[in-house]
Amino acid sequence: MQKAARKHIIVVVFSIFLCSAPGIVNAEALSPKDPYSWVRYFNDPLLEAAVQEALNNNYDLQKALARIEAAKAAVARAQAGLKPTLNLRARALELVGLEGPGYSAFAKGVSVIADWDIDIWGEGRLELDAQKARRNALYADLAFARQSIVVETVKVWFLAIETGRQMDLAEKSVETYRNVVTIVEVKYKAGAVPKQDVNLANADLARAEEAYLQVQGANKEATQTLKLLLGRDPGGEITLSENLPDILPYSSGNDSPQLAAERQDLLAARYRHDATSLNLEQAKKKNYPNIQINSSANKLSKELNILTDSNNAFATFGASAEMPLMDGGRNKADTLAAKAEEKEARIGYQKKSLEVRHEVQEALANDELLQKRKEFLEAALAESAQDLGLAQKQYEAGTIDAIKVIYSMLRVEEAEIKLLHLKTAQLMQRADLYVILGGVLHEK
């Protein structure tokens, strides 16, 4: 039990310091701004409030929002690069002759200068599209982080409830084993059983007490992890639901691959690949000629206006073309670097696509396996309960002693513990399916 709790604690702490019954909802009911709408399926207001609290108090989501603001600024800068610039220039200088008789004059002028770098090869548009792709990747990262935080909160919530219930069952088992020890010791003193039976009874009691301490530690770890997710003080109290929600049947439908293709982490990888592809195209065009349109309106003093020999205002208009001839290999190096970045992003996207397909298949197979295991455990619990009822009747009839009734009772408790643990595993699996299938599950 502690291993299970520790596993989820590691995942939760990792997600916090690096930056979210199954979601059986309609696709229309789900939106990126409401990443926990599927949680309402469990019909647990306390869980819904905990999820909202976790989202509000997560520092990594706040940092992700700041990164998005920076990406928006980069997009705005790229958009501005496609527009003309207008500058005001004022000058004041002292003219001093260097040859002949001494000459000195004070000159001043003011100019309004407009420049427009014509994006004839589309480099500016490529840069703009690349910045938009990076911004979209950050949006997808944020959405996936929110989904992951929601899922981890739900899973730890279930784990905390389960371990709390397990503590009750484990405490009950300890009390039952103590009764066994008492009965066996009485029978040993009466010479009805050998000393070995007393040793075995005490050994069973010791194992039951150790199991109780183990589940007690797991409950403490799960509760503290949940407080960490919610941003609560470690010493504070937290109110959990009394029972785990019911698990209803569901179907992933025939569109599981299509749903998984819309996963936010996969979309982020695709956007990053798009950005690097655009940057590569932009790098290839750096060797093309650049055309710029220039114009200005000037008002200069007579000392500076040597063309018209007057202090009247005048305007200029023209165009310039520039083409790189030799840059020492800089453009070639930039192109090679852009190719390497595009290749890395493409491989990352392909890898993520493959991982997603494997996750979908594995998750669906695991869900079916857990359902089959549940059916066997429910059958075992039913048979154990029936055996307990028969044992109690036999005891009342005097055909068996109390020890056999107690062992039948322990088998029922053991089946209840296993079934409770499996139910938690199913609920966690359903929560994982929310992310794995892109946030959409269908009612059966």
Image: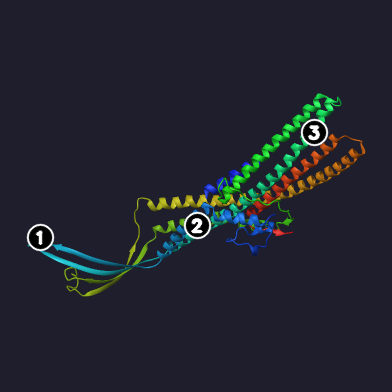
Identified by mark 1, the residue type is Glu
Question: Does the residue at mark 2 contact the one at mark 3 (Cβ under 8 Å)?
Answer: no
Residue 215 found in image quarter: top right
Q: Is mark 1 on a helix, strand or loop?
A: loop
Dot 1 crowding, Cα within 10 Å, few <14, some 14–19, many 20+: few
Dot 2 crowding, Cα within 10 Å, few <14, some 14–19, many 20+: some
Q: Residue at point 87% right, 41% down? A: 392
Question: Does the residue at mark 3 contact the one at mark 1 (Cβ under 8 Å)?
Answer: no
Q: Nearer the viewer, residue 23 or 437?
A: 23
Q: Residue at point 41% right, 50% down? A: 333
Color style of the picture = rainbow
Quarter of the image where the N terminus is located: top right
The label number, if any, that marks residue 180 in the structure image: 3
Residue 9 found in image quarter: top right
Q: Earlier in the sequence, mark 2 or mark 3?
A: 2
Which residue carries the number 1 mark?
99
Which residue carries the number 2 mark?
65
Location of residue 176 in the rendering, given as x and y in whole percent from the top left corner: 78, 37
Q: Is mark 2 on a helix, strand or loop?
A: helix
